[in-house]
Amino acid sequence: DARVTQTPRDKVTEMGQEVTMRCQPILGHNTVFWYRQTMMQGLELLAYFRNRAPLDDSGMPKDRFSAEMPDATLATLKIQPSEPRDSAVYFCASGLGVTDTQYFGPGTRLTVL
Amino acid sequence: DAKTTQPTSMDCAEGRAANLPCNHSTISGNEYVYWYRQIHSQGPQYIIHGLKNNETNEMASLIITEDRKSSTLILPHATLRDTAVYYCIVRVKSNTGKLIFGQGTTLQVKP
C-alpha cells in the first residue's frame, strides 16, 4: 500500500555539519508537512507545502533550517550548521490537501554530537 | 484550535474493548475531532475523525457526545499491537494544516 518514505532512517553527525533529510510523499498527495519530535517538546510542526509552494514555515528556526520541494516526489529538510539541540526524530507527512488527513512517514532519527 | 485533555495512561486486557476518553470542552462548531496513534519508534498513524456524528471504520469507533465537549475512541477488541500513545486532536478544517499534538494517552494492552 502507498506510504510516505523518509531517508535516512538514522543519522549521526557532528556539530557544525550539514544535514539533509529527504521525504517522498504518497503519489498524488499535494501537501507535505515536516514535524519534529523530542521528549521535551513532543511533536511540533516545522513547515508545510502545498503544490510545492511553502505555506507556513513559522515553526522552523530560519537561521539554520530550510525546507524545499524540488519536485512533486521529493521534499527536503536541511540543517546547516547542525547543533546538538537539533537532535530529534523528524517526521514527514503528506496529504491530498491542507485540510486532509495527514499520513506520516517512519521518521529520521537525528543525533548531533 | 481547541485544547484537549486526555488521561496520561490506561491499561486494557487483550481482547477487551479499549475506551479512550478525550475532553474538548472549548470546541467550536467547525472543529473536527481527530485521533492518531503512535506505536513506539514509528510515525503517527491516522485512526479516525468526526465532526458531530459517531463514526466507525475498520480500526475503531468514535463516539462524540451531543454537546461535542467530549469524545471516546473505542478499539473493539484490543490486541498487544494496539499498545501505543493515542492523540486526540481538535482541528478546524480551514486553510491551515496544523495538527497540534498534546501529550496523548499511553495505552498498554496486557495479555
Image (tube, coloured by chain):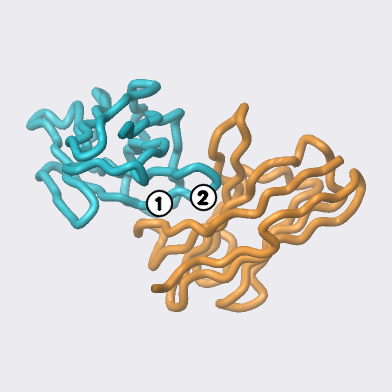
Task: Name the mark on residue A100.
Answer: none
Name which quarter of the figure residue B85 lies in: top left
Residue extending farthest left:
B66
In the structure shown, which secondary structural element does the residue marked by tag 1 occupy? strand
x and y percentages locating residue B88 in the rendered image: 33, 36
Kind of residue at disc 2:
Gln
For the residues bearing labels 1 and 2, Cβ distance under 8 angstroms: yes
Q: CA distance from mark 1 to mark 2?
A: 8 Å
Task: Name the mark on residue B45.
Answer: 1
Q: Chain of mark 1?
A: B
Front in this rendered view, residue A5 or B90: A5
Image chain in cyan: B
x and y percentages locating residue A15 in the rendered image: 90, 44
Kind of residue at disc 1:
Gln
x and y percentages locating residue B101 in the rendered image: 45, 37
Tell me, what hue is chain A? orange
The residue that disc 2 covers is: B42
Residue extending farthest front:
B111
Q: Chain of mark 2?
A: B
Front in this rendered view, residue A26 or B67: A26
Seen at 44% across and 31% down, the residue is B102
A88 over B66 or under it: above or below: below
Between marks 1 and 2 in the image, the one whose residue lies nearer the viewer: 2
In the structure shown, which secondary structural element does the residue marked by tag 2 occupy? loop
Q: How many marks?
A: 2
Query: In which quadrant is the N terminus of chain B drawn?
Result: top left
A63 left or right of B40? right
Q: Are marks 1 and 2 on the same chain?
A: yes
Query: In which quadrant is the C terminus of chain B drawn?
Result: top left
A93 over A51 or under it: above or below: above
Seen at 76% across and 54% down, the residue is A11
A76 over B74 or under it: above or below: below
